[in-house]
Amino acid sequence: MKIKRIFQVKPAMVYNIFDKRFWGDHMNILYLISFVETVKQNSISKASKKLHITQSALSQQLQNIEKELNCELLKRSNKGVELTQEGEIIFSYAETIIELYNNMLSDIDKIKNDSLKEIKISSCSSVSEYLLPCTIHIYKKSHKNVRFSIKTEKTKQVIEHVKNKIYDIGFIDDIINDEELEQFNICSSDFVIIFNNKKFKIPHDSFTIDIIKKYPLILINGEHGIRNSIERLIEKSDIRFNELNIEIELDTIEAIKQSVAAGHGISIVPLTSVKKEVYLKLFDYIPLNTSSNCCISMIYTKESLSKEHVREFIDFIKKTGKETFC
């Protein structure tokens, strides 16, 4: 039997079918399923067998729909059933309702059977604030069932928390030697001198690193791994720390940038942490062309690899981490 589709169902129409005038007090989704199956089978007896109910029960459901809508939907004969004009309308809506209903059940099953998997990350600020957000965003596009919990901490805390399995993965800006941890070096960032060029006139062409002894220096404090890299850089330059005019030690790179922009002193930071400010010309910078730089690493325990979703993210970082960093 050919069924004529007389219109396209629009979203607004889908909403209206849930109005009480359509549903009444007794109609339910099973009645609509029975009606659609009867039309498809072109027989009440065949539909009742397919639905595993008696013919009388099926006939009662069809009568209930007609009663609620106050119209005849099917014409019954020895040749089967035939849709009335009202029946064609109800059939079109009923198919849409049943499809929505099945989609709803499918989405519920996905939540039950494929619940969100969490990856807990502990990271130093130079990675979590400036590099990692883009990577997480890109990864989430193809891994919607993974949820990230990211905690920004000092490098020493990151190391301890990963070792104690409080977090699955850690990101640090230092090189460590710890047999309990696996370490993967992702990339490195050059160090730069940043300063307010209205307050400090530092020559670009004739700059040498020993010039920093002449200016008030703002450094990140010793609890951060990046401080170790800065100290190594200075030591390789044959400069003693007691020769430096350390104005203040701050806890975050953000605080350092604000202080430098205000003209309180100059600082040494990774280029990756000041790219935005350099682009906006909020302060000036001079690259430090040395062999010492800030090393960005991922750390984890062998136990973390036992979790499939964590292992997949670790593999992703190893393959494309540097390219996906902001």
Image (spheres, grey):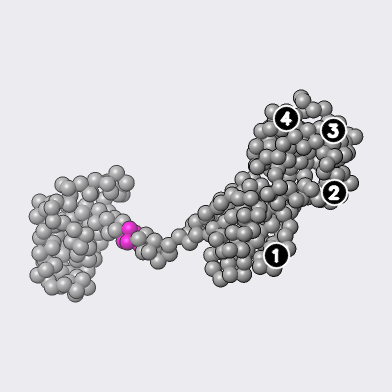
Inspect the magenta stretch and tell me whether residue 113 lies in it. Answer: no
What residue is shown at x 25% (from left), y 53% (from top)?
93
In the displayed structure, 151 sits above or below 306; it is above
Q: Amino acid at mark 1?
A: Asp
Q: Amino acid at mark 2?
A: Glu
Q: Which residues are magenta?
A: 102-106
Please indicate, yes or no, whether residue 215 appears anywhere in the rendered image: yes
Q: Amino acid at mark 4?
A: His
What residue is shown at x 71% (from left), y 32% (from top)?
260
User: Dots 2 and 4: beta carbons under 8 Å?
Assistant: no
Category of crowding for the residue at label 4, using alpha-carbon neighbours closer than 10 angstroms: few (below 14), some (14–19), many (at least 20)? many
Q: Residue 41 — which label?
A: none
User: Dots 4 and 1: beta carbons under 8 Å?
Assistant: no
- Judge from the rendering whether residue 84 lies leftward or rightward of residue 4; answer left or right: left
Mark pair 3, 2: CA separation: 17 Å
The residue identified by callout 1 is 178
Callout 2 secondary element: helix
Q: Residue 214 — which label?
A: 3
Mark 4 or mark 3: whose residue is earlier in sequence: 3
Q: Amino acid at mark 3?
A: Lys
What residue is shown at x 62% (from left), y 56% (from top)?
158
Q: Position of residue 319 (x, y in %)?
A: 67, 61
Which quarter shows the N terminus? bottom left
Q: Residue 235 — which label?
A: 2
Q: Residue 264 — which label?
A: 4
Mark pair 1, 3: CA separation: 38 Å
Front residue of 136/73: it is 136
